[in-house]
Image: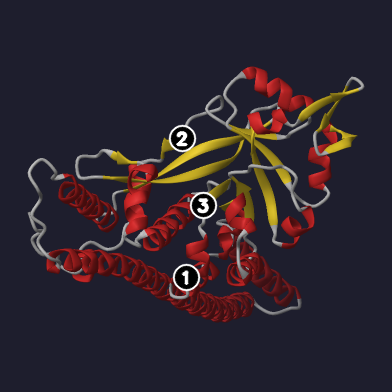
Amino acid sequence: MGKFVPAILVVTYILISASVAAMIFRGGSDGGTAIAALAGTLGCCLAFHAYASQQMAERRIIRDVENVRDAHRLMVDAIDSTQKDMIELADRVQNQRTSRSEELTSEVKMLEDLVMKLGESIEDRMNEWKSGPVVVPLRGSPAMNHKEAQALALIETIREALTQNRVDLYLQPVVSLPQRKTIFYESFSRLRDVTGRVLMPAEYLTVADAEGLVPSIDNLLLFRCVQIVRRLAKQDRRIGIFCNISLTSLRDETFFPQFLEFLNENRDLAGSLIFELGQDAFATRASVEARNMAKLADLGFRFSIDKVTTIDFDLQDLHRSDVRYVKVGANLLLEQLLDVEGKPTLKFLKDIHAGDYAGLLARYGIEVIAEKVENERQVVDILDIEIGYAQGHLFGEPRAIKEQVLAETDPPAGFVKSTMPQQGRRRA
């Protein structure tokens, strides 16, 4: 109500009362009656005003109370909705924690099994050596005893590198041509000894193979590689990575079912991870390996063939086996070129242009990657036959990924000591 309204109402009441008094006075009544009428009318007006004001005040109070009640109901509904959302959020967080905990438990258990298996193999070999007959070397001919001691020392170095998580992942770019944009990486697992020196596969595989340790090493390195690729994928590094898989891993009745379960829990990696086999390994795979490759393909994973010695592929077999990439050495690829009537052709496909070879494989869903590209001349020749991808030191050497990525894939501290058999003192 405006600040002038009360004054206007008072003036109005006075005017009404004066009008009533004037009318009574004019009607022949004396002045006292007129004044009494004035006072009575004014009193009635003020009484009416008081009553009306009270009614309006009560209505305002009732309206304010209703507004407060409505606001309270809205607040209660908002609190209930917020509590419901918080409960749902807590449930989701708890489910994620439970899922993550189960995932880590499964992962650690698998890594534990792999390390245990490798440790038992080495422990058995140590015990056989310690319990064997003592060989007294002849004068001037200590080579055999010394060679065996070196082999066992190397095996111990391998065991320590694997159990102490001294496993590095090296990545080499695979680029598109002619843009030279990195589309994929090839991964290489490398071990380091306690001094930090990198152990190349050629250095330890011969000894490990003689001791029957290659399957365990292959399985463990493959699993660690996939762990690291998963970490890269979770950092939104959505790029294809070639990861080597051996026939021993594919046919290992203990390892492969666990590995398959692990990949099933990480099916989001199917777009980032490509398993790679050598051409000879692929050709000699048995039914068990072929079935297990099919199981990986059912999860969405693809395959690549490297270590190629002949480019006359059985394309239908490659397609049926979900092979989507073949890596051919640049020299091997260019050695197959012939000049027939001024047109480049391939030795085993003389009736088609060499540039149609990549297109022929593409019709089977297979991309050709020229690897071991070392100079620009090779790039020119590869482009002439319309190969779309290349890999080699010309585009980048293998480089170790950051150590913190590796550290994030390590198992919980302390579990290795509890799972590895204790080594006795080696015989001098």
195 to the left or right of 216:
left
Mark 1 or 3, nearer chain start: 3
Tell me the residue that label 3 is attached to.
244
Residue 272 visible to an observer of this rendering: no
| Residue 29 x/y as whole percent | 69, 80
Tell me the residue that label 1 is attached to.
252
Rendering quarter of residue 420: bottom left
411 to the left or right of 53:
left
* Gap in angstroms between the C-alphas marked 3 and 2: 15 Å
Residue 63 visible to an observer of this rendering: yes
Tell me the residue that label 2 is attached to.
398
Residue kind at label 2, given as amino acid type: Pro
24 to the left or right of 214:
right
Q: Residues within 10 Å of mark 2 (few under 14, many from 20)?
A: some
Report how many numbered discs are placed on residues in the image: 3
Nearer to us of marks 1 and 2 is 1
Mark 3 or 2, nearer chain start: 3
Q: Residues within 10 Å of mark 1 (few under 14, many from 20)?
A: some
- Residue placed most toward the observer, 193 or 142: 142
Helix, strand or loop at mark 2: loop
Helix, strand or loop at mark 3: strand
Mark 1 or 2, nearer chain start: 1
Q: Residues within 10 Å of mark 3 (few under 14, many from 20)?
A: many
Residue furthest top in the image: 377
The residue sitting at 23% across, 61% down in the picture is: 413
* Gap in angstroms between the C-alphas marked 1 and 3: 15 Å
